[in-house]
Amino acid sequence: MKRLKTVIEWTLIKPSESLPDFIKALQKERIVIVVRQSDKAIVNGFTYIEYQTKAVFNGSDTIGKEYSTKAILERIGVQKRVASNSKANVLQTATLKALEMELETPDNNPKMP
């Protein structure tokens, strides 16, 4: 769990433009995020899969409130952009669709053992 927290912190030090950027940065460190979302495309949870230590962590439940979905989205600026936009659902849906499209391409899938 310590490695996961360290990698997340280092990833957040570098400015991420979006959730897909954050996810790609973690993939380079052999950590995959499973994004859980509601039927209305609202992100409501992250599950972290860490291949180096072969461990799975469910967001704030196991690694702390500072790594909850809400906290991560705020730190990368997604929540602020959504809150300040009168078309919040449109922006969030577009972000998630872009994420899905980027993660579905073979070039973006890390080679995991």
Image (spheres, rainbow, N blue to C red):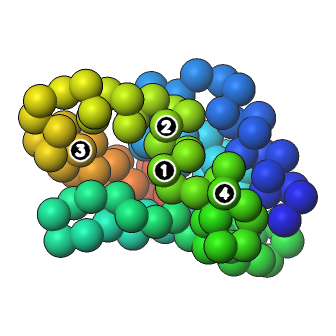
Occupied quadrant, residue 53: bottom right
Whether residue 105 can be seen here: no
In the foreground, 5 or 22:
5
Question: Is residue 26 placed above or below 54 in the rendered structure?
Answer: above
Labelled pair 1, 3 in contact (Cβ < 8 Å)? no
- Residue 74 badge: 2
Query: Does the image show residue 109?
Result: yes
Q: What residue is disc 1 on?
A: 70
Q: Is residue 81 left or right of residue 69?
A: left
Q: Work out how far the residue at label 3 is from the one at label 2, CA to CA, in angstroms.
A: 13 Å
Q: Check disc 3 and give the amino acid type.
A: Gln
Q: Residues under labels 2 and 1: Cα distance? A: 6 Å
Q: Quadrant of the C terminus?
A: bottom right
Check disc 4 and report the residue beneath it: 65
Residue 49 image point, x, y percent = 65, 70
Q: Is residue 92 left or right of residue 1?
A: left
The x, y position of residue 1, in whole percent, is 84, 65
- Disc 1 or disc 3, which is closer to the eye? 1
At label 2, the amino acid type is Glu
Q: Residues within 10 Å of mark 4 (few under 14, many from 20)?
A: few
Q: Identify which residue, 21 or 38, lies in the foreground.
A: 38
> What is the secondary structure assignment of the residue under circle 4?
helix
Earlier sequence position, callout 4 versus callout 1: 4
User: Residue 60: which numbered mark, if any?
Assistant: none
Label 3, label 4: how far apart the Cα atoms are: 22 Å
Choose mark 3 or mark 2, whichever is in front.
2
User: Residue at horizontal 66%, vertical 57%?
Assistant: 65
Up-down: is 2 above or below 73? below
Identify which amino acid the numbered label 4 is placed on: Lys
